[in-house]
Amino acid sequence: MKAMSWALAVALVFAVAGQAHAGGWRHLGDAGRIERRADGVVVHSGPARLQVSVHADGVFRVRLAPDGKADGDASWAVVQAAEPAKVTIDETRDAVRVRANGMVAVVHRSPLRVDFVDDAGRALLADDASLPMAWLPGEHGTRVRVWKSMPADEHYYGLGDKAGPLDRRGRAFAMWNSESYGWQGTTDPLYKSIPFFIGLRGGVAYGVFFDNVHRSSFDFGKESDGTLSFGAEDGPLDYYFIAGPQPAQVIERYTALTGRTPLPPLWTLGFQQSRYTYHPESKVREIAKQLRDHRIPSDAIYLDIDYQKGYAPFTVDRAQFPTFEKMIADLRKDGLRTVLITDLHIKHDPDNGYAAFDSGMRSDAFIRNPDGSLYIGEVWPGDSVFPDFTLTRVRDWWGGLYRDFAAMGAAGYWNDMNEPSVFNVPGNTMSLDAVHRMDDGTTRDHRAIHNVYGMLNARATYEGLLKLQPTQRPFVLTRAAYAGAQRYAATWTGDNTASWFHLAQSTPNLLSLGLSGMAMSGDDIGGFIGSPPPDLLTRWFQLGAFNPVFRNHAATDTRPHEAWVDGPKHEALRREAIELRYRLMPYLYTAAEENARTGMPIMRPVFLRWPDAEAFYGNDRDFLFGGDLFVAPVVDERLDGHPVSLPPGGWYAFGTSERYVAAKTPMKLDPRPSGTPLYARAGAIVPMHALVQHTGETPKGPLELQVYLPDAGSSECRGSLYQDDGESFAYREGKFLRVGYTCEVAGASTTLSAHVEHSGFAPWWKAVRVTMFGVTQRPASVRVDGAAVAGWKYDAAAKTLTLDVVDAVRDWKVEVVR
C-alpha cells in the first residue's frame, strides 16, 4: 500500500480474466478453473493459483502462487503436519464454500477473494472486495500483500514483542529482527518477528499466522481506518486462518501449529541475578554470598561477556576466573545455577589455537559472501564470523561447542546479539547479500533468512544440549526470535531503560509474547540502561515477581540493581515480593505445565479468560497470573490513589477474606499500597508451600492449599497441582503427579475434594494444610472422609478455617458443616 494511494486502490477496475494493474501491483482477477481436492480447492486466475485448504481442526491455509508454481511445504515455524479433516465443498454461481468443523472458507469468484465465516454465517475475516490479493515484482523478489476488511469494533493483539499498547489497532508494524538499544514506545521493529495476531470482537476471536520469514509488515488501519493488511517484500503469500471462537482456543491451535514451550526446569522459574558484568571470579562469589546473607531467595547467577577471553565465545578468561569450574560447583552447592552468555559470533582468529574458530573452519561452518569469501563483521571480539545455522550439520557443530561448559556444570545459556547484530555497518546487521546454504543444496541470501536466524541459533543450542545431556531439560535464553522459537528458548525484551515508562511497558510486551506463543518471557528488572531510583527499582521487583522469567539485569555503567542496594526498607519490600513468588512456586509450576501442554500463557490478559469483558480489551497494566490470580501492579510514580477494576465475578484480596465484586467504577486504593495488589478469584484453590531460599531446597511442613470460597451453588470452585522432579524428562514416561481440587458451597455445608488424576511421582509432602477464606461462622463440625477430626482452627476475625489432611497424596474429601 505504500506504493499506491488509497484513492487509486479503491478505483481499481478488475479484468474478467487476469490481473488489474495499479501502482505496479498485480491483483487477482476473477476465478477461472476450480480443482477440488480432499482438503480444499485450488482456484486458477490467469497464471495465478490460489489454494484454500483445511490444515487441521479449526485451521485453514491460504496460499497464493502468482506464477502458478507453489513453493513446497517447508517451514521453519510449522511443526503440525496437515491432518485429515471432514471437508465438504459446495459450489454456487458466486462462490465456492469449503466447510470443515463449523467453519467455512467462502471463495468468491469475482473478484477472487476469501472470507471466513462460521456456521451461523457470521463473518470473522474477509478480504477487502476492492483490493484482492496482489503481488509486485521487484529487484530483490516479488512483494506480496493481502487486504482485509476491518470492523470498527474489532481489536488486534499479538505480533510478539512490540512496543506501545497491547491493542494493535490504528498502528502499523514491521517484522525485521533488529538490535534496539534503548528502544522506546514508538520504536519498531524490535528484536523479534512473530507474524501472528488475534482478532477479537464481541467476545469472538480468530487468529492469523502469516508464515513468511522475509521482511514483512502489518497495518491495522493506520493507512485506512477500514482496512487491515499484511504482506512481505518477497517469499510466499502463505497464511493460516485459526478459528476460535474463544481466544484460548486460538492460542491452543496456534501453538499446536508452531509448537509449544517445553516444560522448563523448575529452577528457571526462580529469581535470577545478572549484570553486565560480574567479574572477576571474586565478584561472582561475593554476589552469591550476599544473596544468601540477605536471605534473597534465588536460583541463578548470569555471567555476561567479560568472563570470556577477549570476548571470544566458548572461552574462559583464566586470569579473571582462575577456578571457573570450582566456582560453578560451589555456586551449585549453594543452590545457585550458572547461566553463561554464548553469543553466536565467533572471533575471526586464525592460527591462534582458538578452538571454536578452528573447528568451524574445518567444518566449513561459516557464512560466506557471494564471491565465496568469509563474511566478516565486527562485534564484541572485533572481526567475527557467523555460523550458517540453516545447515543441519552446522547446527550440530554449534551444539557440540557446549561440551566443555556442560561438563563444568553450567546450567543454562544465553544467546544474545542474534538478530544478528553487527557493529558499524548500515542497519547494524549482516550484509543482505550474504549467502546461507540449505540442506537441499540450494542457497538463500540473508534477506530470506534474517528473521529466522536467531531462532536457528537457539535451536542449535537447545538441540546440542539435548545431545550432550539427554536426560536434562535445557535452558536457553534468546533475544531474537521467529514464530516457533518457543520450542527452543525463553526470551526477554532486550535493552530497556530504567524509567517508569519501561516498567509500565513491560506488561503489554510480555502479554503479547505470551499471546504469540512465547510464554517464558521477562524483562530486565530495573532497566538495563540507566540507574533506577529506589522506588522505581522496588516497584519493578514487585511486578517482576509475576513475570514468567524473573531476572534482574543491568548495564555495566549503572549503579547496582541488587535487592539490598537501597537500604533496609526497600530491601524488605523487594524480598517480600520474591518470597511470595517462591511460596507460590507449586501454583506457578502448575501454570508452566499447562502452558507446555496447551499453549496457555502464564501471564494472561483478562480477556483470555473472560472474552466478553470488553472493559479489559485495552487494559495494558493489569493481568492474570495463571488462571486464578489477578495482578494490579503500581507502575507509575503518582501519589494519588491507585485505581483497580476487577474482572467479572467475585474476588478476594490475596491471603485474606476481604471479598470484592467487579463493579463498573474502579475502587481506589488510597494511600497507594506498598506492595502489588493481588487478588484471588472466588472459587480459586491455590497450592503453595513454605518459604525456601531456592527451588532445590525441600520446603518444611505440608503442602498448603488456599481455598477462596465461592458463592453457594457456584460450579467454578477448582484448582490443580502438577509436580515432577523439576529437572529431567521422566515426566514424559508418566513420572509426574497431577491432582485436581474442587469445592462446593451448598446450604449449610462446604466440601473440598481432592482427586489424584495421575500418580507417577512421589512428592516431598505427605500432608496438606487447608486454609479456607470467607468462612463467615464457626463450623459445627469438620470431617475428613466422613470421620470427625480435631485440631482444626477457626479465626472469627480473619474468617478463616485451617485444618490438616494427613496422608494426603490420595483422593480425599473434607466436609465443613455450619
Image: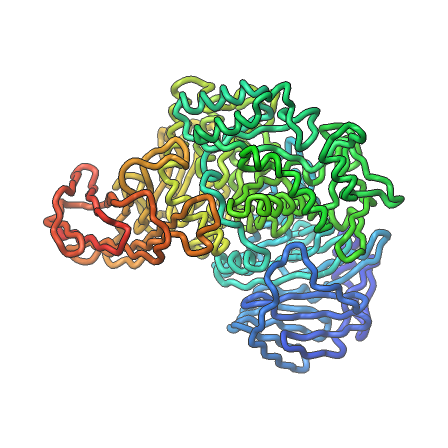
**Residue at the image point whose x is 10% and y is 49% from the top:** 780
Q: How many marks?
A: 0
Quick one: quadrant of the N terminus? bottom right
Residue 537 horizontal side relative to residue 156, left or right: left
Of residues 678 and 186, which is closer to you in this image? 678
Is residue 682 something one can see in this rendering? yes
Residue 672 horizontal side relative to residue 322, left or right: left
Residue 465, given in percent of the width and then of the height, sits at: 59, 44
- In the rendered image of this protein, does residue 173 appear above or below residue 310? below
Of residues 214 and 202, which is closer to you in this image? 214
- In the rendered image of this protein, does residue 718 appear above or below residue 658? below
Residue 267, given in percent of the width and then of the height, sits at: 46, 38
Of residues 203 and 241, which is closer to you in this image? 241
For the view shown, which residue lies furthest in the left direction? 780
**Residue at the image point whose x is 62% and y is 25% from the top:** 307
For the view shown, which residue lies furthest in the right direction? 371
Residue 678, given in percent of the width and then of the height, sits at: 37, 39
Is residue 614 something one can see in this rendering? no
**Residue at the image point whose x is 45% and y is 56% from the top:** 733
Of residues 381 and 316, which is closer to you in this image? 316
Q: How is the image coloured?
A: rainbow
Among the 4 quarters of the image, the one containing residue 405: top right
Residue 216, given in percent of the width and then of the height, sits at: 71, 51
